[in-house]
Image (spheres, rainbow, N blue to C red):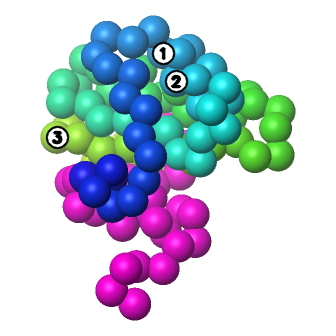
Amino acid sequence: MLEAGGFEVIDLGRNVPLHNFSRCALEVDADIIALSSLMTTTMEGMKQVVDDVSAISSDRRPYVLVGGAPITPAFARRIGADAYAPNANAAVKAARELLGLKDKKE
């Protein structure tokens, strides 16, 4: 959905070491790291990615957008994510909002 929304997406795949997210984001100068979890067992990994991104000493650190079946707005706030999306359509809207882009309908 993000690609259809006009974003360039680099898919790191499944079962990726958590430090790869922030490392790759720095290498490609990413604006957003979007994470999706389908199982509660992987949710805490999102917190580690947020912590890794928070430790980046760049003035242009990427935003972290989280979502997925077990994720809630409260969880996103608790881990310090920049945005939450309940589904793929909302993720596109949230990504556009994070970057200050107008909705295509406007």
Q: Quadrant of residue 39?
A: top left
Pick out the residue farthest to the bottom. 106
* Kind of residue at disc 2: Phe
Foreground mark, 2 or 1? 2
Foreground mark, 3 or 1? 1
Question: Does label 2 or label 3 sit earlier along the sequence?
Answer: 2
Q: Quadrant of residue 23?
A: top right
Asked whether 85 falls inside the magenta stretch, the response is yes
- What residue sits 30% from the left and 44% below the top? 67
The residue tagged 2 is 21
- Give the structural element (helix, strand or loop) at label 3: loop
- Check whether the beta carbons of the residues at disc 2 and disc 1 lie within 8 A of each other: yes
Q: Is residue 31 left or right of residue 90?
A: right
Residue 105 bears which disc, if any?
none
Residue bounds of the magenta highlight? 78-106
The residue tagged 1 is 18
Q: Quadrant of residue 11?
A: top left
- Give the structural element (helix, strand or loop) at label 1: loop
* Kind of residue at disc 3: Ala
- Give the structural element (helix, strand or loop) at label 2: helix
- What residue sits 53% from the left and 16% below the top? 20
Residue 69 bears which disc, if any?
3
**Classed neighbour count for the residue bearing mark 1: other residues with Cα under 10 Å, few (<14), some (14–19), many (≥20):** some
Q: Is residue 69 above or below residue 96?
A: above
- What residue sits 48% from the left and 15% below the top? 18
Distance between the Cα atoms at labels 2 and 1?
6 Å
- What residue sits 56% from the left and 14% below the top? 19
**Classed neighbour count for the residue bearing mark 2: other residues with Cα under 10 Å, few (<14), some (14–19), many (≥20):** some
Q: How many marks?
A: 3
Measured as percent of width and height from the top left, residue 69 is found at 16, 40
